[in-house]
Amino acid sequence: MTLLQDRQVRWFVCFLLLFAVMLFAAGMLFSAVYGRAAQNLYLDRSAEIASALLGQGVSETIVASALKSDGVTSDGLRLMELLGMTERTSARLLPMLDAFQRTLGAAVVVGCAGLILVLFAGTLRFLIFRRRVYECAAQTVRRYIDGDYSTRLPQHREGSLFQFFAAVEQMATILQAKEQNERQNKEFLKATMSDISHQLKTPLAAMMMYQEIIADEPDNAAVVREFAAKMGASLRRMETLIQMMLKIARLDAGSIRFEQRSVAVAELTQSAVQDLLTRAQREGKSIRLDGDPTQQLVCDPAWTSEAIGNLVKNALDHTEYGGEVLISWACTPVLMQIKVEDDGCGIAPEDIHHIFKRFYRSERTLHTPGVGLGLPLSKSIVERQGGLLSVQSEPGQGAAFTISFPLTQS
C-alpha cells in the first residue's frame, strides 16, 4: 500500500497494532486475575456457609451435598426472598459482593484510563509531528512566493506527503529557472540596447556633422560629394551594425532554429566567399580554397556560410596588399575542421583572449574597418550548432581560425 510508504504513517500504524496487542493482553490479564478473584470469593463464601452449617450440627454429608448441589428449588428461592437476597437486591447490602465490585470497577477504570492515555499520547505525538512538517512546508512555500529559493522542502523520506513535497519542489525549481531566465533576458535586453545606443552614437554624430557641412556649402559640388559619400559610409556601417546585433540577439535568445543537413564543404566555402572575391581583387588580395571537394558536413548551410564569411572578412581586414587568405578543410577521425588563415599582421598576445568579445577592438587595429561583431557572431553560430571556434596567431605571422564540428552529429 502506498499509504504505508510514509515512515510516520508506518510508525502510527505500528503503534495502533501495538496498542491493540496491549488491549488484548490487558483483557486476558483482567480475565485471568478477576476470574481467580471470583473463584476465591466463591470459595470463601462456601467456606462461611459450610462453617455455619457445621456449627449448627448439620452433618458433613448434608453440607457437602448442599455445596455440590447445582439445582434450584422453589423452596430455596422462597427462602432467598425471605432473606432479601434476590436479583433486585442492591450490591451494597451484600458486603462481600460489594467489595468485589468496587475492586473490579477501580481496576477497570485504572486500566482503561491507562490505555486511553497511551492511545492519546501516541496519536498526539503523530499529529504534532505532522503539524511541524506542515508548518515547515507552509513557511518554505511562502518563501518561494516571495522569491526566496534558498530553503528546500524535505524529500529524503518516502510516502505520499513527501512525494507531494517533491512535486512542489520541482515546481519551485521551474519557477526559479523561469525567473532567472526572465532576469537574464531583461539584463540581456538592457545590455543590447546599451551596446546599440553606444555604437550608433558615433556614426549618428558624424552624419549630423556631415549634414551641417553640406547645408553650409550647398553650392560647393566637391564638398557635397565628399561628405555625401562619408554619410553613405556611415549609413552602411550603421546598417551592418544593426543587422549583426539583431542576429546575435536572436542567437542569444534561442529564437533561431538551425536546419541541419548534409552539404559539401567546398560548396559551403564557395558560398561564403562569393561576395568577397570582388573586394579581395580590388584590394590586391587573393582568396584560395584547398580541400577534398567530396567531403560533407552536417550543418545549417546558410548560417555556417555566414560564420565562415565573417572570418574571411576579418582576415581581409588584417591582410596587407598582396596578401592571401587560405580556406582549407580536412576530416579527422572525430572532427571536420575548416580553417581560415591569413598572412597579415597577426594578433597580439594581450588581445587574443578578448577578440571574441562584442565590440572589442585592439588598439593596434583601430585603423582597420569593422565594428567588432563579426567574430562574436561567428562564434555564436558555430557553438549553437555544437561546434567550436578557436584561434592561433603570432604577431606579424598572420592568424588561423579553426571551426571544428564533431562527426557524431552526422
Image (cartoon, rainbow, N blue to C red):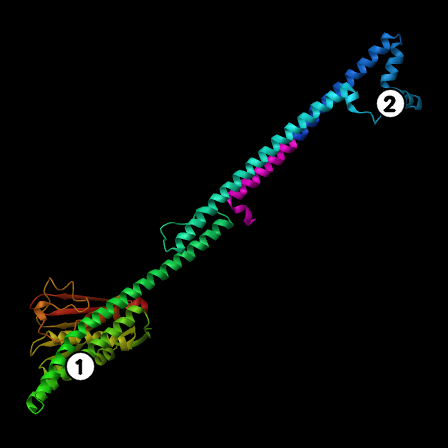
Q: Which mark is residue 188?
A: none
Q: Which residues are magenta?
A: 1-25
Is residue 107 toward the left or the right of residue 64 in the image? Answer: left
What residue is shown at x 30% (from left), y 65% (from top)? 186
For label 2, the residue is: 70
Which of 13 and 300 lies nearest the eye of the viewer? 13
Which picture quadrant has residue 179?
A: bottom left
- The question of residue 203 being in magenta is answered with no
Q: Residues within 10 Å of mark 2 (few under 14, many from 20)?
A: few
User: Which amino acid type corresponds to the residue marked 1 in the rendered image?
Assistant: Leu
Q: Position of residue 136 (x, y in %)?
A: 44, 46
- Assign the magenta stretch its main secondary structure: helix
Q: Position of residue 54 (x, y in %)?
A: 86, 9
What residue is shown at x 7% (from left), y 76% (from top)? 320
For label 1, the residue is: 235
User: Which amino acid type corresponds to the residue marked 2 in the rendered image?
Assistant: Asp
Is residue 120 toward the left or the right of residue 294 in the image? Answer: right
Q: Taking the image as drawn, is residue 406 in sight?
A: no
Hey, which residue is sitting farthest right in the picture?
Answer: 75
Q: Position of residue 162 (x, y in %)?
A: 47, 49
Upstream in the sequence, badge 2 or badge 1? 2
What residue is shown at x 25% (from left), y 71% (from top)? 248
What residue is shown at x 24% (from left), y 70% (from top)? 193
Which of 347 and 246 lies nearest the eye of the viewer? 246
